[in-house]
Image (cartoon, grey):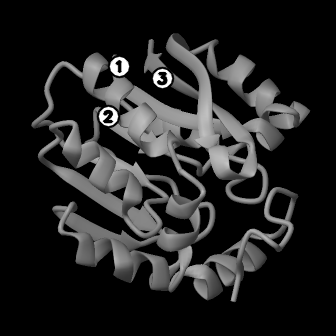
Amino acid sequence: MATFDKPLWQPRSPEETRDIYRDWAATYDADVQGAGYATPGRLAVALAEAAPDLSAPVLDFGCGTGLSGMALAAQGFTNVDGTDITPEMLEKAQATGAYRNTWASGPGDAPPDGYSVMAAIGVVSLGAAPADTLPTLLDALPKDGLLGFSYNDATLADESYMDALAAAQDSATLIHEAYGDHLPGKDMKSSIYILRKS
C-alpha cells in the first residue's frame, strides 16, 4: 500500500506513477486529508474568481479520487468533467458525484477540445506528470481559456518545471500566483497558478 512513507516526489515513468496511485487509491483520501491537503481548495477559489462563467464545462485533468472535483463543485462550478490515468483512482472520483463525465486517459494523452477552463491540481509535478504536460494543456485551450495548476515545494525546486512555466508565458498571461499550504502535516507548501491563454 502506497503511503507518504514512499519517496513520492522524484522522477519516474508514467507506468510507475500509475502503479503507485493504483496501490494508494484505497487510502489516498484519508492519507492526504489527514495531512491537511489544502491545494485543491485554494486553487478552486482562485479559479472561481477568475472564470467568467461557472456553468461552462471545466476539465479536471488528473482528477485522481475526486478531491479536486469536489473542491471545484464547492466553489460553484456546475459542469466538471474528470480524467485520470489510474482507473482505481477514477472509480473513486466517479463515486463522489462531483463529475458530469469521467474517463480514463493514457499517459501523455492531450485533453480534448471544448474546455475554456482546465484544472490540473497537483498533476504537473515532480513524481506525477512531466513538465512538458504544461504546454500540452495550454495548447488545448481556446484564446482566453484558463489553466489552473499547482507546483509543490519539490516541483518548485526542479528547473525543468520552472522552465516550462516561464516558456508558457510566451503564449499565456500569468494572472494569479500564490504560495501557501499544500500538506501542512508534512510541512509542505505549494504555489498555485492561473494562466490565461493569449
> Measuring 81% from the left and 70% from the top, which residue is drawn there?
13
Tag nearer the camera, 1 or 3? 3
Task: Pick whichever of labels 3 and 2 is earlier in the sequence.
Answer: 2
Q: Which residue is mark 3?
A: 194
Q: Which residue is mark 1?
A: 143
Give residue 58's position: percent from left, percent from top: 26, 43
Q: Quadrant of the N terminus?
A: bottom right
Q: Which residue is mark 2?
A: 117
The residues bearing labels 3 and 2 have C-alpha atoms spaced at a distance of 10 Å
Tag nearer the camera, 1 or 2? 2
Give residue 187's position: percent from left, percent from top: 75, 43
Q: Nearer the viewer, residue 164 or 71?
A: 71
Q: Is residue 133 visible?
A: yes
Could you tell me the amino acid type at mark 1?
A: Lys
Q: Where 49 sits versus 155, above or below?
A: above
In this rendering, position of residue 125 left or right of residue 103: right
In this rendering, position of residue 139 left or right of residue 134: left
Q: Quadrant of the C terminus?
A: top left
Tag nearer the camera, 3 or 2? 3
Task: Pick whichever of labels 1 and 3 is earlier in the sequence.
Answer: 1
Q: Where 197 sits versus 23, above or below?
A: above
Could you tell me the amino acid type at mark 3?
A: Ile
> Measuring 62% from the left and 61% from the top, which residue is drawn there?
108
> Measuring 39% from the left and 59% from the top, which residue is drawn there?
67
Which secondary structure lies at badge 2?
Answer: strand
Give residue 171's position: percent from left, percent from top: 56, 16
Give residue 18's position: percent from left, percent from top: 65, 77
The residues bearing labels 1 and 2 have C-alpha atoms spaced at a distance of 11 Å
Could you tell me the amino acid type at mark 2?
A: Val
Which secondary structure lies at badge 1?
Answer: loop
